[in-house]
Amino acid sequence: RKYLGEVGVVPAARRALVLLARANAADDWGFNEWLYGLTGVPRGMRGQSWSAASFLIACDAVARTAAGTPRHPLRGGRRAAGRRAGPW
């Protein structure tokens, strides 16, 4: 699995990040559980940590790609000698 930026579509990755930011900014940065697909109205519970975490991961991926270091050190990097493999 690769990030958009890693396959040469950095502009598309940035546009997708802007759309994700707009979705999460709805309802005063509510990070709602979901948005109604036809209207974009926030639905479900506010303050969903997985929504916030996904946004932060996306921001990090786009920033790392722009900086020329697209891989997160815990995903795709080498493990330190003697360390057990994690879920990544």
Image: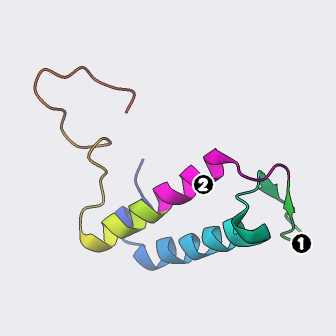
The type of residue carrying mark 1 is: Thr
Q: Which residues are magenta?
A: 44-58
On the image, the x and y values in percent for residue 81 come to 10, 26
Q: Mark 2 highlights which residue?
A: 52
Would you identify the image quadrant in which residue 3 lies?
Answer: bottom left
Hey, which residue is sitting farthest left in the picture? 81
Which class describes the residues within 10 Å of circle 1: few (<14), some (14-19), or many (20+)? few
Which color scheme is applied? rainbow
Label 2: which secondary element:
helix
Q: Is residue 34 left or right of residue 87?
A: right
Q: Position of residue 53 (x, y in %)?
A: 55, 50
Secondary structure beneath dot 1 equals: loop
Secondary structure mainly formed by the magenta segment = helix
Q: Quadrant of the C terminus?
A: top left
Is residue 81 placed above or below 10 in the rendered structure? above
Identify the mark nearer the N-term, 2 or 1.
1
49 part of magenta stretch: yes
Is 59 contained in the magenta span? no
- At horizontal 89% and vertical 69% (from top left) the residue drawn is 38
Q: What residue sits 62% from the left and 46% below the top?
A: 50
Residue 39 shown left or right of residue 34 in the figure: right
User: Spatial distance from mark 2 to mark 1, Cα to Cα?
Assistant: 21 Å
Q: Which residue is mark 1?
A: 39
Up-down relation of residue 9 to residue 1 (above or below): below
